Image (cartoon, rainbow, N blue to C red):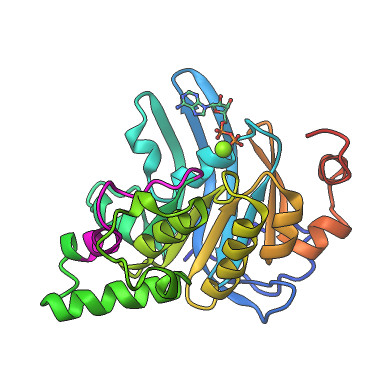
């Protein structure tokens, strides 16, 4: 783990090099470290030297106007950009001190350790059970059917979906409501015991009630997982996150404890954004 601290000096909460502070919690160990990450799509540069420390068992929110690079940076964290032709990532990203861009690293395993939930719920065209069982099966996490059943049940519980689906596990996942489908996708991510869960605007296709349920769930999940959420809603960032990073035109302008970013940001651009001067 590098010892230098990249959290900007405006971060009054940070107390030591390998932990970062969240407003309501004691200092948290850093799980993911990014240093000078730049991303290019062909000749066009989309991200410029992004450096950030992401603490474990807390929610970090990425905010900023559309097109500023939030999704691009999120995809760097589990190498989803590898799947985009012409996309090139420079810099260094470590998960628990391990370089995730190491050529020897198994990307499939990385994506189990760093799971992802997308904007539009995307359950497989399979049963509710199979959606959750798929990952544990391909990763060999269950020795037999009983163990697999237990993983499926536990994952659906953790995703606050069990009581709603326990009598219809063999029905198609696509038959659920939008909010239920998104919780199914979260259960699917949880089923392989990830360390980090990335969520790219997970509520943007949902109604307010379904959104509130997901936000409640995110709050519970942070007890066991490190969560990074992209959101275009500052209210959502303020409600669910402990740390917030503000992106603008491909730059990480500043990041810090969420209450500080929203009440006393260090940068004028952040102030202008959170007060609605552009967006
Ligand atoms: N697959 C892609 N190919 C080319 N350019 C892309 C691709 N994805 C994103 N971009 C560009 O990269 C910049 C950042 O986009 P994105 O990360 O999607 O922003 P955000 O998630 O903040 O809205 C934008 O200029 C966008 O047009
Ligand atoms: Mg996006």
> Residue 102 versus residue 145: which sits nearer the camera?
145
Total marks placed: 0
Q: Position of residue 240 (x, y in %)?
A: 67, 64
- Left or right: where 32 falls relative to 154: right
> Residue 238 versus residue 163: which sits nearer the camera?
163
User: Ligand 1 appears in which quadrant?
Assistant: top right
> Is residue 224 depicted above or below 230 in this figure?
below
Q: Quadrant of residue 109?
A: bottom left
Q: Position of residue 163 (x, y in %)?
A: 43, 75
The residue shown at (47%, 53%) is 177
Q: Is residue 64 visible?
A: yes
Q: Quadrant of residue 191?
A: bottom left
| Magenta segment boundaries in residue numbering | 119-136
The residue shown at (82%, 41%) is 273
> Residue 187 versus residue 168: which sits nearer the camera?
168
- Left or right: where 14 falls relative to 81: right
- Left or right: where 45 falls relative to 209: left
> Residue 228 versus residue 2: which sits nearer the camera?
228
The residue shown at (22%, 59%) is 134
Most extreme residue toward the top is 43
């Amino acid at each position: 783990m590098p010892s230098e601290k990249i959290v900007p000096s405006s971060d009054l909460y940070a107390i030591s090099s390998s932990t970062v502070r969240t407003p309501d919690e004691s200092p948290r160990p850093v799980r993911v470290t990014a240093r000078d990450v730049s991303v290019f799509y062909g000749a066009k540069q989309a991200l410029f030297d992004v450096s950030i420390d992401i603490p474990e068992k807390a929610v970090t929110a990425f905010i900023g106007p559309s097109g500023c690079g939030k999704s691009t940076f999120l995809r760097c964290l589990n190498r989803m950009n590898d799947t985009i032709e012409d996309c090139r990532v420079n810099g260094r990203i470590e998960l628990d001190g391990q370089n995730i861009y190491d050529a020897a690293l198994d990307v499939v395993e990385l994506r189990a350790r760093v799971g992802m939930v997308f904007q539009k719920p995307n359950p497989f065209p399979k049963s509710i059970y199979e959606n959750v069982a798929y990952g544990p099966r391909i990763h060999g996490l269950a020795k037999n059917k009983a163990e697999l059943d237990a993983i499926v049940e536990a994952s659906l519980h953790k995703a606050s979906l069990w009581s709603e689906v326990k009598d219809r596990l063999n029905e198609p996942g696509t038959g659920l409501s939008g909010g239920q489908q998104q919780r199914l996708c979260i259960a699917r991510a949880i089923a392989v015991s990830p360390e980090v869960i990335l969520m790219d605007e997970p509520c943007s296709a949902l109604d307010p009630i379904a959104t509130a349920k997901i936000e409640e769930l995110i709050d519970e999940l942070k007890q066991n997982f490190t969560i990074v959420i992209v959101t275009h809603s500052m209210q959502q960032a303020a409600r669910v996150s402990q740390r917030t990073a503000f992106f603008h035109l491909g730059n990480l302008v500043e990041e810090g404890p969420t209450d500080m970013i929203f009440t006393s940001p260090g940068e004028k651009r952040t102030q202008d954004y959170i007060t609605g001067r552009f967006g």
